[in-house]
Image: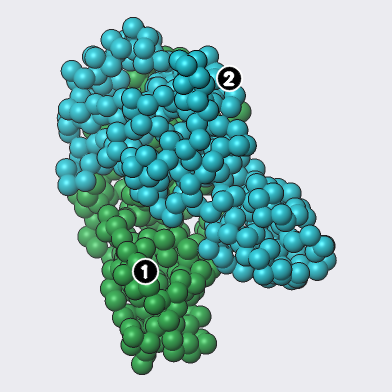
Chain colours: A cyan, B green
């Protein structure tokens, strides 16, 4: 009986919330985290993703946290502070844009290509080399694939993930037409504190990261003193970022990724030390690291 | 003769390059920097903005560098490193979305609203409160105003800046329909080193900021040691951000905004000290600060 319970709790059937349409890069992140069979709950806004997890409509949530071209998704850092969830894992998704069409359409037939303007703008070399193809802005990358399939458009294409082509039964005409291949988005997998972390598809890395947030007052050297808690214990940082605190000129929030697991004594001592030095401190999560 | 030359060099008539259509928020930034009469050179990509300045097709360039919701524009930090221009000034533009229509159209007539999907997604409360209005993705915020004016669409609206309404002769039906008013973008005004900085429209602040970039090796405490150059001289930081160096695991670029002018002796000594501690260091600019 006990064994059965354990089994059913590791096979998690409640869906994983994400922002976007099915086939969005966030769903690709969910597959990397939990495997292809993971159930999904698409949401329109990031805040709805967090609310779905809070209301137990979802067992976990996948959120983008930073992109190599566009920087940190500050909105999601704000939600991480407002909702007290734990980070179970991180993953990097390479943003690969594919030219997709309905079965039977060849590249020569494509007269216009639908996608989100950000994706269209990341494929300018493709459009420069193919001036016969018109760019058509659409609401969403994956949604543009869904639309050309539903409407059976034979002279149109869409730019989206390979996953979107798979989900909507479309074909990839040209792979990886993005201008810059160094376009990666880092995602966090979140779960409620006190609930078991969702079982990950890949064996977790032995190296861990710990993400913390803290604030300091406006005194020169405040950050320097705060970092002493880690530097004097030879703990390594993987990321640091400051954000001004609204309504409090020259006071800052700092986001820090440390190498190490929060259960390590050395890290616990460093965090205790930081609590003395900072006005506010919270551990947002400690999770298996993927390469930097 | 000498006096005349001086006068003509301060009245700068070469245009200022920016990415986007006329009426984009970047043009609003140019007005804040240089006044309403500044000539503009719209470009399709950020890289073209930098190339226009390099080729003297523009006398200056305005680029977004960070947004309070979406984080740093890393692509532009990369261009700042690749092109060696100086930062002449910074400004913050509040991203205000307005519902805009052609003259004669009242709100009750508006059946669909065009804009960039990012802007449409930042006005979800407006669309929830007005379910009779359809959202129509378009290539650009300002471009959607241009389109409804050119096509004389009487039952359509567009979401864009007040400047776009002004430029294309349209009317604002509802001001500030964005969900989150804490949406600001920080812009830099760039010019070529060795050329005079463009004359600013507002008297510059007495407080200065200095933006530097440096790299450190992967040794615990490397950032801590680097920051000692500033902390031990009581110099204050306004921003810090790390980025992984591509192809060099666990090595980082750091972007730092310091309070102070690079001509101050204390700052020069700190920068000299940092040069000893860092593998690479460059001052990207020193410019009048606007409030944090």
Q: In this rendering, is residue B192 above or below A93?
A: below
Q: Position of residue B196 (x, y in %)?
A: 39, 56
Residue picked out by circle 2 = A203
**What residue is at 31 percent from the left and 70 percent from the top?**
B129
Q: Chain of mark 2?
A: A
**What residue is at 35 percent from the left and 55 percent from the top?**
B185
**What residue is at 28 percent from the left and 10 percent from the top?**
A269
10 Å neighbourhood of mark 2: few (<14), some, or many (≥20)? few
Q: In this rendering, is residue A54 above or below B30?
A: above
- The quadrant in which residue A104 appears is bottom right
Q: Position of residue A252 (x, y in %)?
A: 24, 36
Residue picked out by circle 1 = B127
Q: Position of residue B263 (x, y in %)?
A: 29, 39
Please indicate, yes or no, whether residue A76 appears anywhere in the rendered image.
no
**What residue is at 17 percent from the left and 33 percent from the top?**
A218
The verdict on a common chain for dots 1 and 2 is: no
Q: Position of residue A19 (x, y in %)?
A: 46, 49
Please indicate, yes or no, whether residue A164 appears anywhere in the rendered image.
yes
């Amino acid at each position: 009986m006990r064994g059965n319970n354990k089994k059913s709790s590791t096979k998690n059937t409640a869906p994983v919330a994400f922002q976007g349409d099915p086939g969005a890069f966030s769903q690709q992140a969910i597959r990397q985290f939990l495997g292809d069979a993971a159930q999904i709950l698409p949401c329109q806004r990031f805040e709805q993703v967090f609310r779905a997890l809070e209301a137990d409509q979802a067992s976990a949530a996948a959120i983008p946290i930073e992109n190599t071209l566009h920087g940190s998704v500050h909105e999601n850092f704000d939600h991480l502070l407002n909702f007290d969830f734990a980070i179970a894992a991180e993953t990097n998704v390479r943003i690969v844009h594919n030219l997709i069409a309905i079965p039977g359409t060849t590249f020569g037939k494509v007269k216009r290509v639908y996608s989100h303007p950000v994706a269209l703008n990341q494929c300018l070399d493709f459009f420069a080399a193919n001036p016969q193809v018109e760019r058509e802005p659409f609401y969403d990358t994956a949604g543009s694939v869904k639309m050309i399939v539903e409407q059976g458009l034979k002279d149109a294409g869409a730019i989206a993930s390979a996953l979107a082509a798979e989900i909507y039964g479309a074909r990839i005409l040209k792979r990886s037409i993005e201008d810059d291949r160094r376009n990666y988005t880092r995602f966090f997998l979140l779960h409620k504190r006190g609930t078991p972390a969702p079982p990950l598809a890949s064996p977790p890395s032995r190296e861990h990261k710990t993400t913390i947030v803290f604030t300091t007052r406006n005194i020169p050297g405040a950050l320097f003193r705060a970092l002493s808690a880690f530097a004097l214990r030879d703990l390594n940082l993987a990321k640091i970022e400051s954000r001004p605190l609204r309504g409090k000129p020259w006071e800052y929030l700092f986001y820090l990724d440390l190498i190490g697991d929060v259960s390590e004594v050395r890290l616990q001592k460093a965090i205790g030390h930081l609590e003395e030095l900072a006005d506010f401190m919270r551990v947002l999560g400690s999770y298996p690291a993927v390469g930097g």
